Image (cartoon, rainbow, N blue to C red):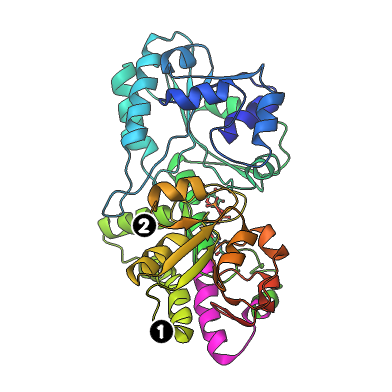
Amino acid sequence: MVTGACLADLGNEVILVDTDPAKVATINESRSPIYEPGLDELLSRNCHHIWATSDTQKAVIETDITFIAVGTPSRADGSIDLTYIESACRDIGRAIKEKETFHIVVVKSTVLAGTTEGVIRRTLEEESRKMAHVDFGLVSNPEFLREGSALHDFFESDRIIIGVADERSQVALEDLYASFTCPKLYTAIPVAEMIKYVNNAFLATKISFANEIGNLCKVLGIDTALVFEGVGLDARINSAFFRSGIGFGGSCFPKDLRALKAQAEERGVQPRILKAVIAVNEDQPLRLITLIKKYHPELTGKRIGVLGLAFKPDTDDIRESRAIPIIRELLQERADIIAYDPLAMKAFSRLYPQITYASSAKELLRQTDTILITTEWEEFEMLDYSNKFVIDGRRVKMAEKGSIYEGVCW
Ligand code: UGA
């Protein structure tokens, strides 16, 4: 969605394809089916250059480049699920078969090293009866956008990574990204795929490292945020993604770490660091429950407010949100939960219809004195926490004014 809208804004004619007719209809009304700051405005502004359909054949025939941007979720065992990739490739391959001009397929979805030249290439070649890098182009162009700041991340990219194996595709991608002044790295296809995983794995490692050190700092009575401010000033390290708290969620870090770990194990390499990063992340949200039980050993029937359900601010996405294991645990303890989130309550209520949802953060504070903070929405900085008992998983400064206040690592 974001890639399509941004490419349209750069002056390209874009056709978006989705199998879900409801999403297609929403896009054709110039509305985005996902919340992302600025995206609706971008869509309306470019409504003459972007439209959506469920007809892959038509979209491939009428364009020069197809970006594959479908999801690559985890299977039950943590390994990568390529069902959507394979089905998209079958549709694209069938369309390429009918096409007379050179078509380029760009893999933007996060796939493990070897996938583009493996199952993706095989499926496209089988369906099209044509040869990759000769009759059609095949490129890996991984995505580094963050939800909540995706438009900024697209237009102000740190770098563009392009895994490519044929001249014609390289020229087409150079042309597509010509207006970007950031570094562009052209690599072999598996290198580009690997860069994406290593990037996410390293950022996740920084967070779990900050959380492990944060847990120690709390015991020692040391301000962990200041420690990481100091450490981050080392130019070799930098301070990004050193915020300690209840860990990382979202649709990327957790599943990408699991997939990389599964790939390593399958290939006989012990992923010791990846395993530790995942383990710290699984324990971290449960520390909020341990903290609250220090004050209220018995949670049965106790009204507890949960502020924040999205996996991070500025998104309505609740995938792998840290609020999920926390609410699961509170339900097990038979607590009486009231929750609030500016954007994510609708999605969350489908998962947990049995809890109460407040109409506003203020309303939540009116209804309970005991509060857990699970997402650092800016509006939570404006609340009056006096006389409240607050356990904070994300470091909301204002909440420190609570009559009792403790943070997960501070
Ligand atoms: C992440 C990467 O940052 C993007 O570069 C990448 O393109 C994307 O995954 C992807 O693979 O598609 P995203 O999941 O949207 O982006 O969100 P992040 O801003 O990375 O946050 C992920 C989680 O880490 C959130 O739960 C956030 O609260 C947590 N986090 C982040 C911390 O706990 N501490 C930090 O210092 C930073």
Tell whether position 203 is magenta: no
Q: Position of residue 282 (x, y in %)?
A: 40, 68
Q: Position of residue 182 (x, y in %)?
A: 70, 43
Query: Which amino acid, mark 1?
Result: Pro
- Residue occupying image coordinates x 43% and y 35%: 70
Whereabouts is ligand 1, in terms of quadrant? bottom right
Q: Give the residue pinned by disc 2.
A: 258
Tell whether position 211 is magenta: yes
Q: Looking at the image, is 293 positioned above or below residue 325?
A: below
Q: Residue furthest bottom?
A: 220
199, 296: nearer the viewer: 296
Ligand 1 lies under 8 Å from the Cβ of mark 1:
no
Q: Is residue 311 left or right of residue 300?
A: right
Q: Give the residue pinned by disc 1.
A: 297
- Residue occupying image coordinates x 39% and y 15%: 95
Crowding at label 1, few (<14), some or many (≥20) Cα neighbours within 10 Å? few
Choose the circle earlier in sequence order: 2 or 1.
2
